[in-house]
Image: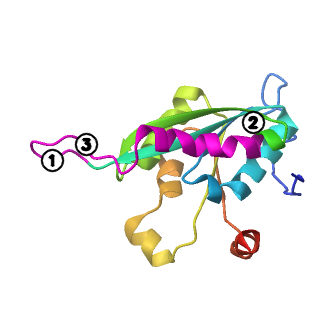
Amino acid sequence: MAMTQIAVPGTDELAPGGRPSFRRILVPIRQASEAAQTLAVAARICCSTNGTLRLVHVRIFDPPMRSAGRFFPETRSEAAAIPDEALPMVWSYGLRATTAVVNAPRGEIGAAIAQQAAAWHADVIVMSRRPSPAICRLLLGSVPDQVMRKSNCPVLAVHPDIKAARNALR
């Protein structure tokens, strides 16, 4: 897979102590099929710093109702398969990566990603931002917005190239 030419500011700068600044890169993945562009950006950062990627999928559940437990729309194995499907894309760049699946109630996905980043000591979070009307983001918010508010590390939101994604599917 060819490395795309993407300019990422700050990747050649050294952090205090003389080491590259973004060595631990967390990449939340909703679907492996939608992750190619986000992984390309994360790979660009990771290659320049000789870092490690962590692919995270959030398994969403609906809050429990009376006399019933949590309802998960996907099984554990389905959830674990999502970051595993993205691993070959990461390996094609010659990078090291780990995977994780975390559970979170619907509406708390951003907090779960931020907590995972803090627990793993991520230097940066690289995630995709799906296009949506501004009014929807204003009223409902978005997961990247939640992550930016709750995370204690930088968040790079990648806007997908819709035309390139459509051409890739043909």
Mark 1 or mark 3, earlier in chain:
1
Would residue 151 be visible to someone looking at this image?
no
State yes or no: residue 83 in magenta: yes
Foreground of the two, 141 or 80: 80
Q: What residue is pinned by disc 2?
A: 22
Whether residue 11 sits left or right of residue 145 in the image: it is right
Q: In the figure, 68 relative to 160: above or below?
A: above
Residue extending farthest left: 67
| Residue 58 in the image: above or below residue 18 | below
Characterize the local packing of mark 2: few (<14), some (14-19) or many (20 or more) Cα atoms within 10 angstroms.
many
Seen from the viewer's position, the closer of residues 9 and 110 is 110
Q: What x and y, as percent, mark residue 113? A: 50, 42
Using residue 150 as the reference point, say whether residue 33 is left or right of it: right
Disc 3, SS: loop
* Residue indicated by mark 1: 65
Look at the image and give the residue range highlighted in magenta: 63-90
Q: Is residue 9 above or below residue 158?
A: above
Quote the CA–CA distance across marks 1 and 3. Answer: 8 Å
Q: In this view, does 13 lie above or below 38?
A: above
Q: Which residue is drawn at 38% across and 71% down?
A: 139
List the single residue furthest toward the top. 17
Where residue 92 sits: x, y (%)? 82, 43
| Element class at badge 2 | loop
User: Which image quadrant: the C terminus?
Assistant: bottom right
**Which of 2 and 75 lies nearest the eye of the viewer?**
75
Q: Which mark is residue 70?
A: 3
- Residues tagged 1 and 3 counted as in contact (Cβ below 8 A): no
Determine the CA span between mark 2 and mark 3: 36 Å
**In this rendering, position of residue 67 left or right of residue 78:** left
- The residue type indicated by label 3 comes to Arg
Query: Badge 3: how crowded within 10 Å, few (<14), some, or many (20+)?
Result: few
Q: How many marks?
A: 3
